Amino acid sequence: MAKKLAIWGGTFLFAVLCSLEPVEAQGAEVEAAIWEASAVWGVPQARLRCLYRKESGFRPWADENPPYMGMAQFDASTWNYARAVLRNPADPRYPLLPPDASPWRARDAALASAGLIARGEGSRWPPLWGCP
């Protein structure tokens, strides 16, 4: 019994350690983007980190899976939709997504993806379903 408990404890510890997402691996630009997007749109940081880890490994330049682009792996239609709906002048957050926003910039991708998630459109990212 003690041996099984030790193995279970080791497995549990291993699972916990593997589920942690090191902030330093994300880089300062990505970390700042996550903090800002979370504060602006009210989407939990853990949810955004989970999504970006699954989609791109926190890499704003990710492009291995065409036609998807950037940290949040936007396709062109979702990116264009986000830019259109999140640039509503009636919304006080309007200036945060600049006219030249790009899915390749961590800040722009985080603000756009968090904005869509906050609008109830998280289903655009199936990997988000398993995120807290």
Image (tube, rainbow, N blue to C red):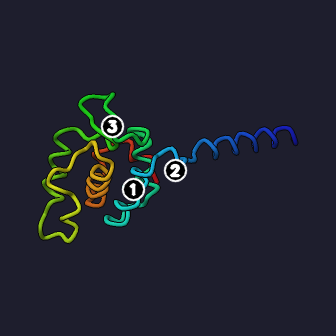
Please tell me whether mark 1 sits on a helix, a strand or a loop: helix
The 10 Å Cα crowd at callout 3, few under 14, some 14 to 19, many 20 or more, is: some
Please tell me whether mark 2 sits on a helix, a strand or a loop: helix
Q: Position of residue 26 (x, y in %)?
A: 46, 46
Please state which amino acid type lies under the numbered disc 2: Val
Q: Which residue is mark 1?
A: 34
Looking at the image, tell me whether mark 1 or mark 3 is earlier in sequence order.
1
Please state which amino acid type lies under the numbered disc 1: Ile
Q: Which residue is mark 2?
A: 23
Residue 72 left/right relative to 11: left
Residue 111 left/right relative to 18: left
Tell me how far mark 3 sits from mark 2, CA to CA.
Answer: 18 Å
Looking at the image, tell me whether mark 3 or mark 2 is earlier in sequence order.
2
Tell me how far mark 1 sits from mark 3, CA to CA.
Answer: 16 Å
Q: Quadrant of residue 58?
A: top left
Farthest-out residue, front: 28
Task: Judge depth for marks 1 and 3 and give the one in front.
Answer: 3
Q: Quadrant of residue 95?
A: bottom left
Image: 98 above or below 125: below
Residue 40 left/right relative to 13: left
Label number found at residue 61: 3
Residue 119 left/right relative to 34: left
Q: Position of residue 86 (x, y in %)?
A: 18, 59
Q: Are marks 3 and 2 in contact (CB under 8 Å)?
A: no
Looking at the image, tell me whether mark 1 or mark 2 is earlier in sequence order.
2
The residue at the point 39 percent across, 38 percent down is 56
| Image quadrant in which the N terminus is located | top right
Image: 125 above or below 107: above
